[in-house]
Each structure stands twice: as C-alpha cells, then as structure tokens.
Image (spheres, grey):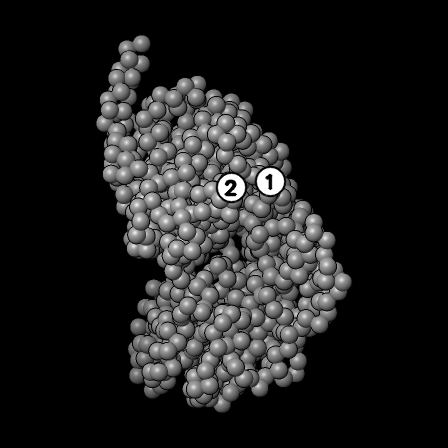
Amino acid sequence: MYKKILFLILISFSIIAQKSPKEFLGYDLGSEFTYHHLFVDYAKHIASTNPLNIQWVSYGKTSERRELGQLIITSPGLQNRLSEILNNHLNFISGKKSFNNDVSNLPVIINLSFNVHGNEAAGSEAAIGLMYNLAKNYQDLIEWSNSKPFVIMIDPCINPDGRETYAIQFNRKNYFKGGNEDPNDQEHFEGKISGRYNHFLHDLNRDWAWHTQIETQQRIKFYQSFMPMLHADFHEQSGQHSYYFPPAAKPYLNFISEGTKELQQSVGKSFSKLFDENGWTYFTSEVYDLLYPSYGDTYPILNGALAMTLEQGGIRAGLSQKLLNGDTLRFGDRVKHHRLLANNLVKWSLVNQDKVKNTFYKNHEIARTNPSNLFKTYVIPKNQIKKAEKLLHQLKNNRIEYGYPDKEISSATAYSYVENKNVLYKVTTDDIVISAYQSASPMAQVLLDPSVVLEDSLTYDITAWNLFQLHGVNAFGLKEKISPKVEISFVGNKNVINENALGFYLKPNNSKEIQFIDKVYHLGFDVVFNDISLENNGKVIEAGTFFIFSKNKKNNFQNLINEANLFSIELNSFSSFRFEKGADLGSEHFKFYKSPKPVVLVGEDFDVNQIGELANFFVNNLNIKTSFVPTQEFFNKPNDHYTHLIIPSNNSYLLKDQESDILLKWINSGGNLVLFENALNSLPITKFSFTKNYNQLKDSVDLKPAYNSRERNELSKGLGGNLLELKAEISHPFLARNVNENSFILNTSNTLYSNNKELNSLLYTSLNPKINGFMGSKMKRVIGNTTWMTTIELGKGKLTWFNFNPLFRSIPTIGQTIFENMLLYHTY
C-alpha cells in the first residue's frame, strides 16, 4: 500500500512539471509548422518529467546531422529491467525459449511512427500532442493495461531532413496567420525539392526492406532490438480525401495469418467508433494494400507484428485549404484526427494486449515450425557466393539466417531460378543454404520465393522483387529441409608480394572492389582491362578483368598490397605480360582504365528521384565525386574534362540546336552520353531508329470501357513494376560483370521501343519473355522483341540509353551492376 501511495505522489509531481505543447512552443498545435529540433526538445522535456518511466532514446543522425530518436514509455518498474526483458522477448521470437502460451508477464510492445514523408506534416505535430496526453494521463495507461507490463515507443519524425525542408519552405511562403485557404495560393505548392523525401531524395517508406538510406539502417537496427508487436505508420494523403484506416485493401501478402487479419478488423472497429462519435468521415479497405514488402506496415507484418497505415487527408493543404465540397480543411483538425486516433490505438492495444502478444508469438512459432514458403531450403552454390555478397548482406539486415549446410545431398530435385524449371542439383558443404524454418521465414518467403501470389492487380507499387533475380544469382530451391550449421563470414585473405610478380589482377565483384581499382589508379599504377577472355597456367581469366602493374616497376607493390588488405580484397598475381591463350598484355585487347568524371544534368525539368538516386549511388556506393550541373552551365562552360554526361528522365526538356551541336562534338571527342528512360526525347533529331511499339494496343475496349471497369482497363495497359527477363549481349564490356545471358531487370519503363538492326541493343526481350509480377494484358501482347538498353558508338564516344531506371530506389540489381560497368569500361 505504501509503495502505491509513493508511486501516485511521484506521478502527481511529474504531471505538475509537464508543460503542454502550447506552453512549451508558445502556440497551439496545428497553428504553425514546428521545426524538428523543437520536437526533440519537447520529447526530452516530457522524458525529464517522469524519468522513472519515460525516456528519450537517440538512435542516430540523418545525412544532415539531425537527431533521430524515440520516446519510450514503460509501465511502472519496467525501465530498469528493460534490457533483460527485451533479451527474453527476442529469445521467445527465435525459439531459444518457449513462452508456452503464457504472455502475462511479458510486456506488449507498441511502436508509433510519424512523418516518414516530410511533407505529410500533421504527423509530427500529432506525435508531441500524443506524448503530452500519455505522460499527463499516465495512470490511464496502467488502468487500460490492467496493471500488466507495456512498452510504448513514439518516433515523432522518421524523416527529419524532409520535414525541415517542407517546414522551411512553407514558413517562408506563408504570410497570413492561419494560412490562406485559396488552393491557388503559393503555400499549397512545394518547391522542386519536395519535403516528402530525405536528403538523397529517397522515399523512406519504400526502403524498410532494402536499407539503402542511413535513416533506415539506423531505424531498423533499433526496431529489431525491440521487435514491436504492433506498429502504426501515420501518413497524409491528398487534401481532398477524408481519413483512411484499416482494414487494409487487397492484395495482401498471401501468408498473413488469420490472427493478424482479425486484429486488423478489431482495431478498425475501434477507429470507426471514434470517428462516428465525432462525425468525421473516413474510408477503409481501399487503395492501401499489403503487398510491397518495404512499407511501414508490410515490413512489421513480415516480422510478426500487427501493423497498419493511417492516412489523413492533408497533402498540399497548408494551414488551411478550401475543399471541393465547400468545407475548409485546417491543419489543426488534421493534427487532432491523428492525435486522437493514436491515443485510441494505444488504449485498444493495452486493453487487447493478450491477443496482440499471443498472435505475435504464434506468428513467429509458425514461421519456425511450419513455414508456408514454397521451398524448405534455398541454396546458393559455391561458385555464386562471391557474386551473392550484397544479397547475403541484405538477408542478414532482414534477420534472415544462413550458413553452410549440415549435410551433403548427392542428387536433389531443385528449382533453378535461372532456367525456371526443376533440375537435379548436388548440394555440397561449401554451398550456402537458407532454411525456411526460422523466425524470419515470412521475410525469406517474400524476398526469395520465385514469385509473389497476387490476389488482385489493383496495387499501387511494384509487384516483383525476387532477390536472386535482382542480383542475377544462379540459386536453387529445394523441397527438402537442410539446416545451416556454420554462419558465413566474409574475410578477405591477406595478400603478400610475390618476388616474380609483374602485377596483379582481379575481376571486381562489388562496389568496394571498384573503389579499390580507382584508388590504385590514382596512386599511379597502370590499370587495364581485357575485352576478350584469356588463359594462363590452365586458368581462364574472363573478359572485364583488371590488371594492375607498373611500367619499369616504378611503383612499389607494397602500396598496392596495403590497399588491397585495407579493402579486404584478394588479388591474383601474374609474372609475365604473355598469356597462353587470348592476347598478350600489350595487345589492343587490353584497354587502359580512366577514372570516370561524371556530370548529371539537373533542373526543374528532370526526375528529382533519379537525381537523388544518382547522388546516393556516387556518394554511398562508388565514392566518386560527381558534379550536378544546371543545363545552361554545362553547355556554356568548358566540359571536355567530363567523361560521362547523365541526363535523368524528363517529359519536357528538349535540347536547343546549338546545345545539340555542342553535345555531338563532345561525344565525338570521347564523351559518354547516358540517357535514362524519357530523356531520349531530349534529343531533337536523331538518326537512330527508335520506333514506339504501340500498334497492337488499339481495340474496342480502349474506345469505350464500362464506367465500373475503367480502373481495371487502365491496369491492362500497365507496363512497369515487375521483373522482366531480358536477353543480354554478354560479350560487350558494359555487360562484363555479373550479368547472365538471361537476366531480369526491375522494369520501371512506361514506353516500348521495337528492337531493330540499327540499334546496338545490349538488353532486349525475346519474343516470349518471362514476367515475374504484374503486367497489363495489353502490354504483354507487344512486350516481345523490344529494346531496353542500347549503346551506339559516335566518333570516339558513345550514346547509351536505358529504357528503365537502373538505379531504381537504390535497390541493388542487375541494372545497378550494368550502370557500374558503363563507368568502369567506358574506354573500350
């Protein structure tokens, strides 16, 4: 009794110390756009008022050095034992401990995230309002939970850089207190650099499974240390829309458990009651599906949690905006809707915590003991392991375990991902196996099964992402269970100097090795690559291999060896410039490497996401300093020091005649012009025969579709968002590394061009290519014999065009490899 009275006294003091958001900020929530540092300061203030049960935990920094963190609210007495409790929780998930269906002593772990899109501004404001509500009414949390343990995590802003970009732009443009409800006023229009994205112009809500951005990498590591049982992702949609909450729309990932679906229905009813009582309109089961695995709802679901997207109407609405129905949508109302729904969700979660916990642990138990994966084991052959390093890194980041097999199988029926059929395969103890019998089997299933089961084609994102096909790895799927016994670690061998060595060679497999080649080039070593295969001492040396040497032994090889060891790269030595087969090192079949100096055209006309993807690629993958230059600067200043000019996709930029002349002269002198997708249309006159392949698309359905089938009629013309099998001209230097004769690209195209003899097509479709994921029925008729990448030689230079985005979302793919090749081998 004494302890309870003491606890209530401590709580009462903390309530007195708490300042409301208005008292702390000096204005009502929703009357202004708050800057990010104030969110952090307020969260720290709330934590300071009840340090026994509330803490602010910083988990990282953004690219622009803004703080990332979460407010953690725990039940009384839990905070001091949190590390021990989380360790037990993770052991239950992995199966190291059995929870025996008794979850009463385990806390329910609730995670609420806001503002993954920086311009969906109501989220962060609602988050600090929620912090105040929960801290002030802490005793309510105890009553709702029936004194059972709980952990509530609140991330007020997943994307601080984007949020700050939006807030600064708005606060600069707005002149009237309360905003201007005229939808034509400038406050309703962002600048070209949208606050939706992070520093590298990436959509963080598409990055949960790929971890290409620093914010994601730090957040997922923090997420996995808690493994929440419920995750809610707060968004905003078009300002003309009402409010969306679960149940989600179809298609679902086909293996979502019935328990998770039932919880979605239950929480949706709780939200409906709240909105009905307040007279707020809403919609459910439309638009927002559960298919793409890298959202803030699907990724937690794949990790066993109940998860949801929550969408308030509000994008472009500013502080106030007149709606089409005559009402005025105010920022304060948007904040209020999010805030009260979040509070309702916390209450529902605590009241229903036993169901939430039981469903979560049951999902993981089923994953470990009875997975629904198509295969029981996925096998990466020994000869594919080096090629699969990025893939394995992605698996590890997603909690997917792998290792060497615990047994050999002399002859097993296996599905070949390259041949798309069953073959016989011998599993050796040098292969790598990924077992479906593990806690992360749902994630393994969605990333590694040959195709995703698509209940419905009405989805709003890409529909295929198989990692083996994305990386071009010749893997196999087995129905037989094989367990990994030893975890794989990649440690490069230490190189030593061979006294007879004239130099060293390697064929780069990853970006680290590409950086190494560029580094030794700048150290003054001679660097060349072969454009035909060689043979030496009975060993085949493939085309595209780099040879590093020093004429007259000017350079000490010790510097080279030190760099290789620093990069953990294993080198092969050679002791003669003569090779048994192919050509000798002084032959014209050896091309000198030249460090690339790329330039990217930027401006209002160009795809802002592609600009960000290019920036991310050059900074975080290859570490090559690249210039991002406005068009007028490139054409009006000396440009002969650039090796590559990259023009991102655009729908409106057209070169002037004078600019075309300058560009043609630059290419003929040795420049490499690279065009992404619609950038092809930037060239006003071309002697190349690019012919659009739309002739077969006209039919009576196009002319007059029924009203209720218009949406599906448009889908029938959908081209992109799938994995498309292409034929690759693998003897060409641009396809020299890690590309198979039959390769899959992540297809982002919206236009088809016929393949013909005048185009030097390096990637093209056969007459009947394989398609993984959804493609419209009308486009399937004309997808055969089309071109996807061409390289045309002009004088000393080249024009290369991609009819897809090879760097899409920075996801490692065959496309990214080919783009790297184009930089590596441009001197052929």
Residue at the spot 57% in from the left edge and 77% down from the top edge: 790
Instruction: Confirm whether residue 99 shows in the render.
Output: no
219 and 21: which one is in front?
A: 21
What residue does disc 1 label?
285
Q: Residue furthest right?
A: 700
Q: Which mark is residue 259?
A: none
Residue drawn where x is 25% and y is 34% of the image: 23
Asked whether 339 or 503 is in front, the reply is 339
Q: Amino acid at mark 2?
A: Ser
Question: In the drawing, does residue 312 fall left or right of residue 568?
Answer: right
Element under disc 1? loop
Q: Total marks drawn?
A: 2
In the image, 217 versus 277, the foreground residue is 277
Q: How crowded is the residue under tag 1: few (<14 C-alpha within 10 Å), some, or many (20+)?
A: few
What is the x, y in percent for residue 246? Answer: 55, 37
Quarter of the picture containing the N terminus is top left
Against 584, residue 17 (above or below) is above
Q: Amino acid at mark 1?
A: Ser
Label 2 or label 1, whichever comes before in sequence order: 2
**Residue 242 image label:** 2
- Residue drawn where x is 45% and y is 49% of the image: 315
Rounded to the nearest angstrom, the CA distance separating label 2 from label 1 is: 14 Å
Classify 340 as above or below 321. Answer: above
Residue 63 placement: quadrant: bottom left
Disc 2 vs disc 1: which is toward the camera? 2
Q: Are marks 2 and 1 in contact (CB under 8 Å)?
A: no
SS of the residue under disc 2: loop
